[in-house]
Image (cartoon, coloured by chain):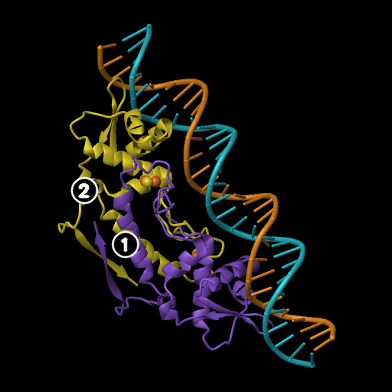
Chain colours: A purple, B yellow, C orange, D cyan
Amino acid sequence: MLKLTKKADYGLMALKYLAEHPETPALSAKDVADAYGIPAQLLAKILQLLTRNGLLRSHAGMNGGYELARDAREISAYEVIHAIDGPFFITSCTKGDKNCDLTPSCTIKEPLARVNDTIAGVLKSISIQDLTEHEQPAGRAAEANRLVTLTL
Amino acid sequence: MLKLTKKADYGLMALKYLAEHPETPALSAKDVADAYGIPAQLLAKILQLLTRNGLLRSHAGMNGGYELARDAREISAYEVIHAIDGPFFITSCTKGDKNCDLTPSCTIKEPLARVNDTIAGVLKSISIQDLTEHEQPAGRAAEANRLVTLTL
DNA sequence: TCAGTATACGACCGATTCTGTCGGCATTTC
DNA sequence: GAAATGCCGACAGAATCGGTCGTATACTGA
Ligand code: FES
Ligand code: FES
């Protein structure tokens, strides 16, 4: 139900962790997994996915591991989710095409597609960098407000 | 993966259908199910859920059925989803409390909560009425643009 | 060259969630 | 009282997700 998978969650955590350790040449999957108590092998597969999709650079061998392929500012949450979980659709008929058996009768597909785009836009506007700036001791005022246009 | 369940989908379709037939006193679950080719019993349960949550009024007996409890303008997509699928959380740790075993280590929960609120806001700003106004023959200009604030 | 560390990738299975069905009961109309 | 309808819980089949394993491959450094 409109929920991130744990894999995507893990992926975001890992990217954030990498973004917070820019000095280190590379961090292994195990390093990150241990830092958060995530199953190491599972995280490894996730990082591999992110590598395949160009979000990370990998390096095998001793002292190998992963590093961000781009600046943390240039990687959006949307890309991460997309790389891990595949195409982003909130409607249950996942394909933009017409694989849904009730495509002819379903009348909410089109309006919901707009909502889909809006949410995707929100996720696209969030970078890994943004995730690292979540500190907010008390009533701080320096927040970044953005406006997202919802077109119906 | 950030996807509506079919139940929520069906629910939205049904509400839209009801909104489009305001003159009829009440439509039975079967009527709506037949109109869209949805399993009738499943839709019945969904409509019961919506009734329980005050979005619909039901009426048993012959010529009974369901009708909107409020104006279509006053029912948001958020309410529908919430009534059918329960609390809305995009993070995999569903509870706002601390039922997630890795709550102490997870560092993205808080920033993602903001994203969650933003998306909820988008859904709250969409009414059933909006779903019925999806016609847009070509390059029409009379669109409703709304601004949603995303606070990070 | 060889051992050790690390990524890459596919197969697989248990757990969870979702979808849909069934059966029985209550309420209203005719 | 019969028919139509809503109400509700239980359940089974299906799909998805989470996590593990085994093995192959690549790189490093001694
Ligand atoms: S659910 Fe598939 S087209 Fe609407
Ligand atoms: S996944 Fe549960 S706290 Fe982040």
Task: Check disc 2 and report its element: helix, strand or loop.
Answer: loop
- Callout 1, which amino acid? Thr
Q: Which residue is rendered at x = 28% and y = 54% of the image?
A: B124
| Residue A69 seen in render | yes
Residue A38 x %, y % = 60, 67
Residue B141 image-quadrant placement: bottom left
Tell which subunit mark 1 falls on. A
The disc label shown at residue A48, or none = none
The disc label shown at residue B133, or none = 2
Q: Which residue is mark 1?
A: A118
Residue A123 x %, y % = 38, 67
Residue B36 image-quadrant placement: top left
Residue B15 x %, y % = 29, 40
Position of residue A108 relative to residue A55, above or below, is: above
Q: Quadrant of the C terminus of chain B?
A: bottom left
Tell which subunit mark 2 falls on. B
Q: Is residue C9 left or right of residue B23?
A: right
Q: Which residue is rendered at x = 53% and y = 61% of the image?
A: A6
Position of residue B46 relative to residue B150, above or below, is: above
- Callout 2, which amino acid? Glu
Q: Is residue A76 left or right of residue A37?
A: left
Task: Check disc 1 and report its element: helix, strand or loop.
Answer: helix
Residue A109 x %, y % = 33, 49
Q: Is residue A152 left or right of residue B1?
A: left
